[in-house]
Image (cartoon, grey):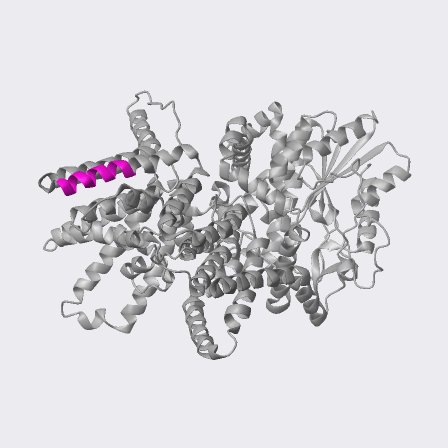
Amino acid sequence: MKRTVSSIVVVAGTLVFLSGLFALQPFTRLSHGLDRAFGALPPWTQVTNMYRDPTTQEVSRGDAVVESFRTLSASWTAYPGAVRVMLMGNSQGLMTSLAPGEAPPSGPEKTYPDYIADHYHQAGSRKLFYRMSAGGMSYQEMLWYALYLSGRPDIKPDVLLVQLNYQNFVNAGIRDGMLALLSDADFRNNVAAVAERDGADADAFAEALHAFDQSQRRSGPAAAGAGRTPGYSMETTFREQLDRIPGFTSRNAMKESFVLLLTRLRVYLLHLGSARARSLSGNRIAASRAALEDLADICARSGIRVILFEAPTNPAVPLYLTPEDDRQYHDFTRSVASRFGLEILDFEHSIPAGEWGKSLNVPDPLHLGREGHRRLADLMCAALERSGI
Amino acid sequence: MQFNSYSYLLLLIPVTALFWALPVPWRRWYVLAMSILYYATWNPAFVAVPLVLALGVHAAVRLLIARPERGRRWFWSGVGLVLATFCFFRYRQFLLSNVNHLLAAFGARPVSMAWQIAVPLGISFYSFEAISYLIDAKQGRIKTSRFSDLFLFIMFWPHLMAGPIVRFRELGPQLNFVKPFELRMLLQALDRLILGLVQKNLFANPLGSWVDQGFLPQAIRNNSTVDSWALAIGFGLQIYFDFAAYSNMAIGVAKLIGITLPENFRFPYHAHSPADFWNRWHMTLSRWIRDYLFFPVTTRFRESPGALYASLLVVMALVGLWHGAGWGFVAWGVMHGACLVLYRMWESLGETRLAAVTKSRLAAWGWRIFTLVAVTVAWVPFRATTGGDAATTLAAMFGRLRFGFSYPVDFYLLVLSMVLFCVVEPHLAALWTRAEEGLTALRGGVPVHSYLLRPAIYACGLLLFLIFDDRSTQFIYFQF
């Protein structure tokens, strides 16, 4: 009897402690403590309430593009004859990291593409603007989009603004949310054609085709039967029941707070931020270069005018490890532009250090503050006007 | 049903409670029923495979015991049945694809196989156990064979899917379940179970998600020397934590019902030679290979080093093939075999005038480093999808030197922190044991560590397990 009671005490004690941990949220508390100790900006500087408009933005950030394109098609076909301008880039176009001294948000915050869209809208011009941004968008993904858009007259842009960013050259591959576009047979054939070529970017497309086919097999009728083993069904039932327990679903948020705690430890103790000065290895450059060149080529053949723009970089965060990296990168962007006769708008040094946000207690390498977005929008509107757009 | 699934863990509580509430004679039948049910949660039809295997082995052993003059024939019939079943499920597709490659080389039409049959989970493990039962019977260690004993030995759910690979003589006597319940047993069980859950969800899975990315064909071509080494080390750590997690959970769950299973890992990356690595890595498989393959081979070729070394290579190639039907696994086995041969050759120098050199501290450190590097390098063909991918990665590691970082800093930090954890792991274990002994000595007062400290540590472990829960990941060794 005593042994049974002892066992129950151990198991019950464990559950009590576990409930206590869920209630206490220790990772969040520790993170707040670290933020205070290391002088980080308040959490509200990382704006979460961003302006959202599915007619001018790809709001899924690359995770559900089929739905986004459906909305875009309805929006653009309602304005026949209008000039369609589309901007492609990374999270710089969809996030705001408020700079020191900027007031807390009082409503949804806009980014520079939103201000450009407003500018066209307010001017009453027959121009439609759309932002195709996603965190860490690779040049292969931009090519993916360009290939798809060029075959869809209803959503094909007249002008494509392509963001050039040194950090983007490290990204590769096509994210899962974009694979659904392969359901379109014509697009699939075009992708297969790129994959079969001997180009540096062919691997990414071949991998994407493989991943899509695999996911189709997994979700197909045969796979559905195979996946539903008795154990699988039982686990699904258990999970559904557990998710009804108050607080149990907060484990996902707790994981996020744990990961953020580790990030803080990395930044505060090891002084390793999310972006550091780096040299890009040859193969990555080659794959991104091939994708960018293919994009320019496809757009030229489809009658889409491409304008490249050098994204602003934070003067407080060096991105190039050596002057040679800087030179190599700019030589490349200029060579693409000259080869395809493209215009480059240079905003690399356009935003002063004070208008950039901070990530924890270190300068953010990518995300602008409120004023930074406004300044960049003004500069871009003026430059686009000079280019006749 | 995965060991780290919610349904398994929650059902474990009533299943264990009912086990201890049952009268002793009923317990073996109850455990057998639970084991069959557990296996059926994967695919009810596959219960027939271990059942048929057990029936065949039981018949062979009965005949072997009853008619010892024909023992050899019955022994080989039993082994043949097990191997035929194992190879049919495991290597059918592999053999066919190789035959088709050969046929294609000669311009012949490929052979197609219309029917697809999945590999029954755990077949590699219970096949080896069935063979060990036959060998023990042949060597006279099993005097009588009861079908229920054999079937329970094979089906015993904690070790059914991925070991530890046990012998009948160490598990069979325990399957009477006469041991009385003790709190110590529960604590030991929870220690191992929760450690396994943390190893799987916190260590192995995050490493796995990076390694999966890094071993994609497209990524492999872009990986620098640093990336390739980090990925090889990362996979070595992932597979260690993954399999150690499974083994810890198996040992813990068996302990919940009073059964002691053998250990499977003993800080393998602290090995001081290739031979020592196999004394620390997947120890129950190493033991099986040593007793049933190495020893007979060594005895046979004692006077002929060349034949002995060749046999070692073949045995290790077979060990590789046991892990999976692919040439990458064979290459992994051969690489380990080559290291073992090299070490044996070095050891044989110890019997000559070079004894002082072979026993020097420098040589000891040299072998320690060589073992770590060789084990890491051997993981590359084991993990890579194709031979070409493995060759590209090895070329990046040794030949085509480039020193860029292609992945976010978190990946390299994760690998580094896991390496550091492996370095201090034996010391942490020793510290835990010492603390445990110290607290137990204080037990004249309040048993604080059983009722307060341990539940607090368990809760922290469970919290980490819960927040890193990922339903989509399997245990690596389940595929073997």
**What residue occupies the far top of the structure in this picture?**
B109
Tell me residue A101's x, y (percent): 83, 64
Residue for point 76% across, 39% down? A57
Residue B299 in magenta? no
B65 inside magenta stretch: yes
- The residues colored magenta run B54-66
Q: Is residue B242 visible?
A: no
> Residue A193: percent from the left, percent from the top?
55, 28
Decide if residue A193 is on the left or right side of residue B309: right
Q: Nearer the viewer, residue B104 or B94?
A: B94
- Can you say whether B286 is above or below B77 in the image? below
Q: Quadrant of the C terminus of chain B?
A: top left
Query: Residue at (20%, 73%) from the top-left corner?
Result: B356
Residue B218 seen in this snapshot: yes
Is B412 or A49 nearer to us in this picture? A49
Q: Is residue B139 left or right of residue A64?
A: left
Query: What residue is at 33 percent from the left and 60 percent from the top?
Result: B280
Q: Judge whether A143 appears above or below B370 on screen.
A: above
At x 22%, y 53%, the residue is B291
In the depicted structure, whether residue A63 falls above or below residue B433 = above
Toward which corner of the image does residue B460 lie, by quadrant?
bottom right
Q: How many marks?
A: 0
Main secondary structure found in the magenta portion: helix
Q: Position of residue B270 (x, y in %)?
A: 36, 64
